[in-house]
């Protein structure tokens, strides 16, 4: 916890290539904004999916943004959906779209309280390419991922978070 209104940045704890080839790099590459990428190639016939997570974070903080620097090098009509996991609805929510590019781009993705596990503070981000055809030459290149949370200055928000955490513990 840094203080009211001051953002805390959390580096990913894990990055899993659910579908895709390891074209280099690992979760360690995502912690620094340094042009060192974790690259995942599309698999012909099945596509591409990468899930990036941050484990335990301060549960008194509220998610505000997820920052991603990277690009999807695919076809002109292909793109990658960027999803945040909603812990209240237990579902992935489309939050952004990465269009075809050949150079890194900075994405700033808004997040809210439902995007963090109320018991642990964990957050999850999913990159999913789903199209009719997949090309082995297409790839997702991620240079930096940062989960940003802020300490709330609202008593109401703090109370709601506390009640939600207690309700989930009792289920």
Image: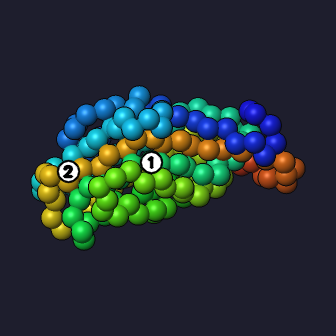
Q: Which mark is residue 98?
A: none
Can you give x and y, in whole percent of width and height, for residue 11 in the image?
53, 34
Residue 90 falls left or right of residue 37? right
Nearer to me, 101 or 1: 101
Q: Quadrant of the N terminus?
A: top right
Can you give x and y, in whole percent of width and height, for residue 93 in the image?
48, 61
Q: Quadrant of the C terminus?
A: top right
The answer to whether residue 107 is visible is yes
The residue sitting at 29% across, 49% down in the picture is 140
Task: Spot the residue most to the right.
Answer: 155
From the image, tell me which residue sits under label 1.
69
Can you say whether 108 is above or below 37 in the image? below
Can you say whether 3 is above or below 93 in the image? above
The residue sitting at 39% across, 38% down in the picture is 35
The residue sitting at 21% across, 46% down in the picture is 41
Res 10 → quadrant: top right
Residue 36 falls left or right of residue 42? right
Q: Secondary structure at mark 2?
A: loop
Can you give x and y, in whole percent of width and height, for residue 64 in the image?
65, 52
The answer to whether residue 165 is visible is no
Nearer to me, 34 or 47: 34
From the image, tell me which residue sits under label 2.
42
């Amino acid at each position: 916890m840094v203080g009211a209104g001051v953002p805390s940045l959390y580096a990913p704890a894990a990055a899993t290539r659910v579908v895709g080839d390891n074209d280099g790099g690992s979760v360690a590459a995502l912690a620094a904004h340094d042009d060192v990428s974790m690259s995942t190639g599309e698999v012909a016939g099945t596509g591409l999916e990468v899930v990036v997570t941050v484990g335990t974070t301060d549960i008194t903080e509220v998610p505000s943004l997820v920052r991603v620097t990277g690009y999807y090098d695919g076809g002109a009509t292909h793109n990658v959906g960027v999803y945040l996991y909603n812990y209240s609805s237990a579902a992935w929510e489309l939050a952004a779209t990465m269009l075809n590019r050949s150079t890194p781009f900075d994405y700033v993705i808004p997040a809210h309280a439902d995007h963090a596990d109320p018991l642990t503070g964990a957050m999850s981000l999913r990159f999913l390419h789903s199209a009719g055809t997949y090309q082995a030459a297409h790839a997702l290149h991620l240079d930096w991922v940062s989960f940003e949370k802020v300490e709330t200055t609202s008593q109401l928000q703090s109370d709601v978070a506390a009640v939600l955490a207690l309700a989930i513990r009792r289920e």
